[in-house]
Amino acid sequence: MALTLDHIVIAVHDLEQTIDDYAALGFTVVRGGEHPGRPTHNALVVFEDGAYFELIAWRSPAPQDRWWQLLDQHGEGIIDFALLPPSTAEVIAAAKTRGLSLQGPLDGGRLRPDGERLQWQTGRPNTHDLPFLCGDITPRKLRVPEGELRQHANGATGVERLSIAVSDLLQSLERYRALLGDGAHIHANDDGTTATIALGTSVLELTQTAPQLQSKGEGPLAIALKGGSGAWDQASAKLAHGAPIAFAQSELAAAVTA
C-alpha cells in the first residue's frame, strides 16, 4: 500500500490576508470552506503533483485543538502534514501488525463554499514526527481541485522536499518503517543525524539537529518546491506567514536545513 504526500498544513491568524499574500507570491489560491463542528476555515494551494498546502485559520479560540495550540504558542507556520492512503482503515490495521498504533479511523469533512459536502477519514499518530493519514470517502477531486487551479504564476509544480525535525532519528525511522511497510524507500545518511524517505515524487528529510526541537518540538519545518527558480527576498518571505518555503533549485532551499 504505497502512501504519497497528500498535504501540508500551515496555520495562520487571518485567512483573508493569507489568501492575498500567497497570491502575491504567485500561488493560485482556492477557498476550501468550513469544517463542520470546528471553528476553522481554510484555503488551498494545489500543485500539479497532487500535493497541496492547507492554509487554515480559526474563527474563535480552540484550546483543545493541538493545531490551535501550536499557532497560539509559536505563531504562524507549518504545523502538520498528511499522507494519502488507499484505505485509511487498512493502513491503520497494517501499521498495528508492525507495532505502530494509530488513532482512528476518525471521520472528518468540510463544507465547500459552493455547498458541496466532503467526507474523509483520518488516522492520527501518537508522536509528532509522523504524519497523519487523510483518506477520502467522497472523491478526492472534490477535496483537491484539478485543472487550471493547479497552475501557478511562480512556476511551482509540486513539493520536492519536506524537512521534518525529529528528536531521535533511529526511533523515528522505526516508526516510519512500521507506517510505510516493507516497500518503504528509506535511506539513513552517513552523518547519523539525517535520513530521507521517498514518497512518490516527493521526499521527506528527517533531521535531529533542527533548532526548532528546543522550542516547538518535533514536526515539519521547511518546504522545497519543484519548478520555478530563485528565492523570495525577505519582504516577500514574510508573505508566507511563517512557513519556510523555497524553490528546490535555489540556494535558500539548500541552506534551510544546514
Image: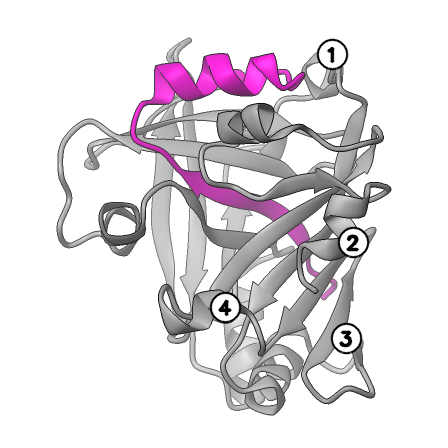
- Asked if residue 160 can be seen in this view, the reply is no
Q: Earlier in the sequence, mark 2 or mark 3?
A: 3
Q: Earlier in the sequence, mark 1 or mark 2?
A: 1
Residue behind mark 2: 254
Q: Nearer the viewer, residue 94 or 190?
A: 190
Image point (62%, 22%), residue name: 145
How far is mark 3 from mark 1, CA to CA?
32 Å
How far is mark 1 from mark 2, CA to CA?
29 Å
Give the amino acid type for the residue marked by disc 1 in the picture. Answer: Glu
Q: In which quadrant of the rendered view does residue 171 lie?
A: bottom right
**Is label 2 in contact with label 4 (beta carbons under 8 Å)?**
no
**Is label 1 in contact with label 4 (beta carbons under 8 Å)?**
no
Tell me the crowding category of disc 3: few under 14, some 14 to 19, or many 20 or more residues within 10 angstroms, Cα based: some
Q: Earlier in the sequence, mark 3 or mark 1?
A: 1
Q: Position of residue 128 (x, y in %)?
A: 43, 69
Residue behind mark 1: 148
How far is mark 2 from mark 4, CA to CA?
16 Å
Tell me the crowding category of disc 2: few under 14, some 14 to 19, or many 20 or more residues within 10 angstroms, Cα based: few
Name the disc covering residue 76, or none.
none
What span is in magenta? 1-30
How far is mark 1 from mark 4, CA to CA?
38 Å
Tag 1, which secondary structure?
A: helix
Give the amino acid type for the residue marked by disc 3 in the picture. Answer: Ala
How far is mark 4 from mark 3, CA to CA?
28 Å
Q: In which quadrant of the rendered view does residue 36 lie?
A: top left
Callout in the foreground (1, 4): 4
Q: Earlier in the sequence, mark 1 or mark 4?
A: 1
Give the amino acid type for the residue marked by disc 4 in the picture. Answer: Pro
Image point (37%, 75%), residue name: 126
Q: Nearer the viewer, residue 17 or 114?
A: 17
